[in-house]
Image (cartoon, grey):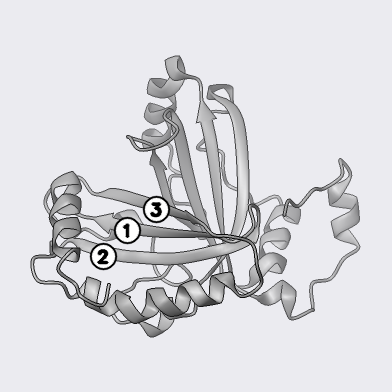
Amino acid sequence: STMLTSVNRIRLFSKRTFTSAAASIPIVEIRQDKLYPHLIGPYVTHCKSTPLRFADPHLRLHCLTDTGGVLNQTMEIYAYPGGMGEREEKILKGSWLRTFQRKDCVMEQTSNIFAEAPLVRSTKGVRGLLEGNPLEEDNKGPLSAIYEIRTYNLKLGYDTVPKFFSLYGAGLPSKLSAVGTDPTTSLVTLLYTEVGQLNQVIEVWRHGDGANAMEKSRVAARSAPEW
């Protein structure tokens, strides 16, 4: 599913009031910017120097792809506890603080809307995105943290995602407590699509001690029987 808006979206949205239950369901937005390879250096320098780095209270993470997917691409993760209504209100007020971004460096942008799986709140040790500070302020580990994004594209069907979460939730505690897991590894969130590719599930893992922590935790997970 893809959400489209007309060129006069501000005029249209200004007539709308978001009072329905659907408008207040908490959401997470993932925005990805594909950069021109020769402008990555200036882009990163600008992002590090701007005082707006974390001025947006909805921003949870802003990172650059290293490997395992499309290169020369950034990811921004925003959390809106008040749902689509809160997101649209932010746009109408002109408070979309993406000005740390050098738009001349960007060739393509995408945006998808997700919801957090219910097990995020009910599982001990899972941080979640809807509350708390930017992820980069979680200073676990002496080395540079990395974020591992794992994507599952599930078959079509209304019951596919709930079944996946049921199986996933049953095995997750075993994985999180597996002997040998690096202490700086944590599951940040588990998301499923609201607007975007149907039946897509995304895991976000944080490894405070970088790639070594990721590999250590992966090996440990193989000994988790339920997982």
Helix, strand or loop at label 2? It is strand
Is there a contact, CB below 8 Å, between mark 2 and mark 3? no
> Which of marks 2 and 1 precedes in the sequence?
2
Q: What residue sits 64% from the left and 58% below the top?
A: 198
> Does residue 208 appear to the left or right of 100 in the view shown?
left
Compared with residue 124, is residue 92 higher up or lower down, i.e. above or below?
A: above
In three-dimensional space, the C-alpha distance between marks 3 and 1, rounded to whole angstroms, equals: 8 Å
Q: Residue 150 carries which label?
A: 3
Q: In which quarter of the image is residue 120?
A: bottom left
Task: Answer few, some or many: residues within 10 Å of disc 2's Cα (few below 14, many 20 plus, some between 14 and 19).
Answer: many
Helix, strand or loop at label 3? It is strand
In three-dimensional space, the C-alpha distance between marks 1 and 2, rounded to whole angstroms, equals: 6 Å
The front one of 40 and 133 is 40
Compared with residue 17, is residue 152 higher up or lower down, i.e. above or below?
A: above
Is there a contact, CB below 8 Å, between mark 3 and mark 1? yes
Which residue is situated farthest in the left direction here?
180
Q: What residue sits 79% from the left and 72% below the top?
A: 18
| Residue 18 appearing in the image | yes
Helix, strand or loop at label 1? It is strand
The spot of residue 152 in percent (x, y) is: 47, 56
| Residue 125 appearing in the image | no
Task: Answer few, some or many: residues within 10 Å of disc 3's Cα (few below 14, many 20 plus, some between 14 and 19).
Answer: few
Compared with residue 12, is residue 43 higher up or lower down, i.e. above or below?
A: above
Q: What residue sits 14% from the left and 57% below the top?
A: 219
Amino acid carrying label 1: it is Trp
Q: Which mark is residue 186?
A: 2
The spot of residue 133 in percent (x, y) is: 38, 64
Amino acid carrying label 3: it is Arg
Please state which of the two labelled residues, at mark 2 or mark 3, is closer to the viewer.
3
Q: Mark 1 points at which residue?
A: 205
Amino acid carrying label 2: it is Ser
> Does residue 156 appear to the left or right of 184 in the view shown?
right
